[in-house]
Amino acid sequence: MTEFAAVLGQIGLRKLGPHNEERAWAAHYLTKVFDGHPKIRIRHPRKHEVGVYYAVAIELDVTNEDSTRIMAYLEQRGYPMRKAFPPLNRHPHFNPETPPARGLPWEHPSYTGNMRGISYRDLQLPVSYEFCYGRVVELYTHPGITATQLDLFAEDLTSSLPH
C-alpha cells in the first residue's frame, strides 16, 4: 500500500462510524414509512447483531415475475437496486467448471458426508430461491441520503406494486 492510499484509508476509517449511522438511519426511516404495508417489509439484523446497511434489504410479497418488473421500473427511475444475492448453492465458488487448485473439500477421499458425489447446483432449496430470486431486493444507500429522497423511492416502489 502506498502512503497516499494509507492516508485515504485512515480518512475513510474516521468517517466509517458516522457513515454507517446515516445508512442505518435510512433503513429505519424506510421501516417507519412502510410500517403496516401488506406487501413491503424492511429486513433488519436479528437482536444483538449490527447491520451496516450498505444496502437496505426489502422483502416484497410479490411473485418473481412482478419482482423483476418492479426492479426494471425502479432501475429505469434511477434507483441503485439489485435483487438479493443468489443462494449459495448456485454461487460459482461452489460450482466451479474446473476444480480449484486447492480442491473441493466434499470431493476429498476422506470425506464421507451427505454431500459426497452431489453437485450443489442440483440441490433444490425452494425457500431460499423464493427469497433470493423473487422476494428480497436491495436499495443501495449512501451517506447524505435525505428523507425526501427516501419518500420519493417509497412512493415509486408503492406505485409499482401489482394491485
Image (tube, helix red, strand yellow):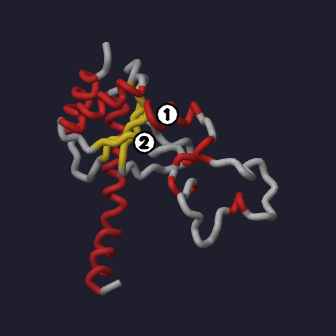
The answer to whether residue 88 is left or right of residue 83 is right
Residue under the image location 27 percent in, 28 percent down: 157
Residue under the image location 31 percent in, 21 percent down: 161
Residue labelled with disc 1: 131
Circle 1: is it few (<14), some (14-19), or many (20+) Cα within 10 Å?
many
Residue at the far front in the pictured view = 98
Q: Position of residue 84 (x, y in %)?
A: 42, 42
Residue under the image location 37 percent in, 32 percent down: 31
User: Distance of mark 2 from mark 1, alpha carbons?
Assistant: 8 Å
Say which of 116 and 136 sits in front. Answer: 116
Q: Position of residue 1 (x, y in %)?
A: 35, 84
SS for callout 1: helix
Q: Amino acid at mark 2?
A: Ala
Say which of 152 and 70 sits in front. Answer: 70
Residue under the image location 78 percent in, 59 percent down: 111
Quadrant for the C terminus, please.
top left
Rendered view: 84 above or below 38: below
Q: Amino acid at mark 1?
A: Phe
Say which of 118 and 76 sits in front. Answer: 118
Q: Position of residue 100 (x, y in %)?
A: 57, 67
Quadrant assignment, res 105: bottom right
| Mark toward the start of the polypeptide (2 vs 1) | 2
* Label pair 2/1, CB-CB below 8 angstroms: yes
Residue 84's disc is 2
Residue 99's disc is none
Rendered view: 15 above or below 155: below
The answer to whether residue 153 is left or right of residue 9 is left
Q: Position of residue 63 (x, y in %)?
A: 42, 23
